[in-house]
Image: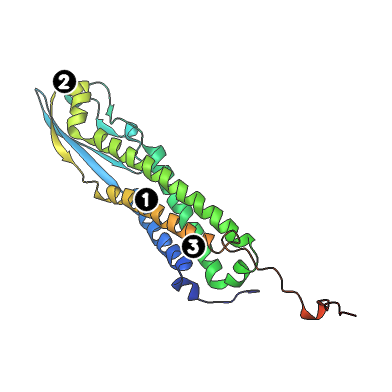
Amino acid sequence: MAGLQLDFGPLKEPIGFIKLLEWIFAIFGFATCGGFSGKTALRVQCKNETRELAAVFQYPFRLNSVLIVPKDTCNHTENIYLMGDFSSSAEFFVAIAVLAFLYCIAALVLYVGYLHIYRDGNRGPIIDFIVTVIFAFLWLVCSSAWGKGLTDLKYSTNPAVIIKHVPFCQGLAECSSLGVSGMGSLNVSVVFGFLNLILWCGNAWFVYKETSWHAPPEPPKQDPGNVASPPQNP
């Protein structure tokens, strides 16, 4: 391939090593969030029957489409769904993680195979720096939004909260909690989100050092042969 000069040396430098960490952490970010599936369950007791009801919720966490009490339960005539829709914050978080993952691949290919082109001029480092700063900001926004969304998700899937807010459990039947799945992997996804924020902020400094804004290029040296000789005294 024209211009390809394979060199793994940049992976030992901060600019390449941190980018590799960002690539790994982005994978953990979208995998721990996008791969989650949980369950919340109730025991419903009425005059003629006792049933155990479970609602399975998963990414992207549109809880208002997840059935918890089907109709005809204790002669109830309507389906009852969980409360809330947290898809916007979850999908935003996963989208940023996937985009960061793809950009890290492109940047690593550039560092390992085309570093001489990257450093030959100023456009490459400046574009890299701007994109890095943008991703650092996006990680801050999406991690904060998903952290708030996760807090609300835990509240909405808590069986005690469901029992409190479902009129069915206040009149037709007696409801009790059977528990809810642990959300450790979702907690980890938020942690990885903020770890990515720290990594991208740190990486921005090392990319900035590659730009002419940090170290302006030296002016071209004048050819000694073209320097005018000083005038001689008469």
Is 114 situated left or right of 51 in this image?
right
Mark 3 = which residue? 206
Sooner in the amino-acid sequence: mark 1 or mark 2: 2
- Assess whether mark 3 and mark 1 are in contact (beta carbons under 8 angstroms): no
Sooner in the amino-acid sequence: mark 2 or mark 3: 2
Q: Looking at the picture, which amino acid does disc 3 mark?
A: Phe
How would you rate the neighbour count of disc 1 (Cα within 10 Å): few for under 14, some for 14-19, many for 20 or more?
A: many
Is 214 situated left or right of 89 in this image?
right
Mark 1 = which residue? 193
* Residue drawn where x is 48% and y is 59% of the image: 205
Q: Looking at the picture, which amino acid does disc 2 mark?
A: Gln
Sooner in the amino-acid sequence: mark 1 or mark 3: 1
Q: Which quadrant would the N terminus be assigned to in this image?
A: bottom right
Q: Looking at the picture, which amino acid does disc 1 mark?
A: Gly
Front-lying residue, 129 or 68:
129
Front-lying residue, 224 or 82:
224
Q: Secondary structure at mark 1?
A: helix
Q: Position of residue 24 (x, y in %)?
A: 39, 61
Reply above or below: 161 against 133.
above
* Residue drawn where x is 33% and y is 48% of the image: 190
Q: Secondary structure at mark 2?
A: helix
Q: Position of residue 199 (x, y in %)?
A: 41, 57
- Assess whether mark 2 and mark 1 are in contact (beta carbons under 8 angstroms): no
Front-lying residue, 171 or 105:
105
Q: Position of residue 227 (x, y in %)?
A: 80, 77
* Residue drawn where x is 46% and y is 47% of the image: 137
